[in-house]
Amino acid sequence: MLKTGAQYIESIKAMKPNIYKWGKLIEDVTTNPATAAHVKCVANAYDAAFDPELAPYFTTTSALSGQTAHRWNTLMATAEDVAGNAHMKRASYWINGSCTGTICAGWTVLNAHFGPSARCDAKYGTNYHQNLIDFMKECEDNAYGLAGCLTDAKGNRALNAAKQPDKNAYLHFEKVDGGIKLNGYKIQICGVAGCNYIVVMPTTGFGPDAKEFAVVAATPRDSEGITIVETRRPSDTRVEEEGWDGIKLGTTQAFIIFEDVFVPDKHVFLAGENEFAAQVLGNFTNIYRAAIGSCVGGQGDLMAGAAIAIARANGLTQKAFQDKLTNIVMVNNITIGLGIGAIMEGHDDGGAWIPDTALAHTNKVQVGTIPYEAKRLAVEIAGGIVETGCVPSYIDMTSPIYGEKLMKAMDAGSGAEDRIKLTRLMEWIHIGGGVPGCMHGGGSPDTARMLVKGATPWEKYVNYAKKAAGIPEDHLVEVKK
């Protein structure tokens, strides 16, 4: 099923209010200034399904039904499917200027668990895999927006989940008649305000003493017992104000409190089989970290375009800054290309395609490093007015007392308003709410380095060197202590 943006908004409007910001309940997330911009961005992604140029990015043929569906409601069965996910993320920045969380992490959880759920069923006789397939079909049939809940509060990082003084630091479950009940906290979750369903998964692997934390399940965003609190973000009050100071785009982040949230058996995909927690997590991070290179690449596209536009607004031309602009594009191409390479070097896992571990996590480290260089170059082109925020507020710029003179001061030959709007856009991308999760989005660079280390065949490399140097293979063998 394909929904228009208007139909999607109606589905969100019909949900019970359970989201708070500034200490107040948001009665309608589709109109409240704190959340409306995100909902509009998600609606843009739904509408993209009907745009001839954008539809190839935002739709695909479902491997489960054979029908055309929103890409984020489908199984990524091939390398081309996962590459399509990456291309969609880049295109999301073209139409929204920022991450569109509701079409990102949730369906990644479902795909990541496709293989592990089947292996769990084979070992324990559970019905998780069929539950998962049925829910994926339900998502497709109803064109759901999904928020993926990975990050737990974690409490004291020196203690594992089972030893936390407050068990709620990690989401956990208890089995009840007909399903499970969820309790605990998920934090820093992207796109919750715009989703129909929340999909939860483990944030780490768990041992036999922590089975109650090994849970994968889906629940409506407005389920009884769920309280959602929107986070403060850079420039969020600007977005809620009238005028051009705030860019009316972007995603949202939230803390989610689960208090005895009932999930029926049909929407439970893992509950206590702890050895499979690390498997779904590993698959998730491989998919996510391969694709995130295209997320920051998409914002790099936007930065390059904004830098050229603001140069023109300053009375200059692209030619004066061409070397810097070319470097921005090359930074983009590194993370996009490395991510696509990880996807193409991946493997099938029970019907879902999983990118290569070493390459995907190498991409994550690059994503946490080099996009900041692209931002620096864009700000160099734009000038100090972007870096230092030296533009008076919209209220001042439109003041009947002195606004006209301020506008004249901002006019560099092509109109003051265009220059101001581009300044605010560049500011938003550089230090505001438009900054994507380069450093820690999808996990930290340090954990990515650990996974690259674990996936690298170090001794094979030593043997290659010994063979090339004419050294017997039994020489220079390290004795493990």
Image (tube, rainbow, N blue to C red):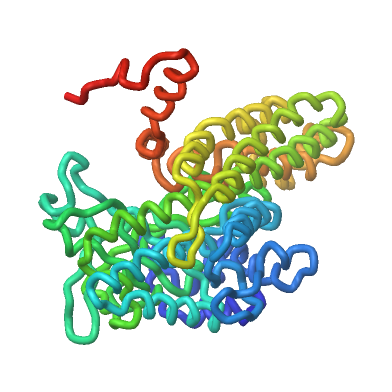
* Image location (x, y in percent) of residue 91: 68, 55
Q: Quadrant of the C terminus?
A: top left
Q: Nearer the viewer, residue 120 or 140?
A: 120
Q: Quadrant of the N terminus?
A: bottom right
Query: Is residue 339 visible to the viewer in this orientation of the structure?
Result: yes
Asked if residue 249 lies left or right of residue 273, the reply is: right
Looking at the image, the residue that sits furthest to the bottom is 178
* Image location (x, y in percent) of residue 169: 21, 54
Q: Is residue 84 above or below residue 391?
A: below
- Identified at 43% across, 81% down, the residue is 134
Quadrant in which residue 182 is drawn: bottom left
- Identified at 36% across, 21% down, the residue is 473
Q: Is residue 176 above or below residue 119?
A: below
Asked if residue 118 lies left or right of residue 361, the reply is: left
- Identified at 53% across, 56% down, the residue is 251
Query: Is residue 385 visible to the viewer in this orientation of the structure?
Result: no
Q: Nearer the viewer, residue 225 or 127?
A: 127
- Identified at 53% across, 34% down, the residue is 366
Q: Is residue 359 above or below residue 29?
A: above
Q: Is residue 231 above or below residue 427?
A: below
Quadrant in which residue 177 is drawn: bottom left
* Image location (x, y in percent) of residue 120: 29, 69
* Image location (x, y in percent) of residue 299: 64, 44
Quadrant in which residue 33 is drawn: bottom right
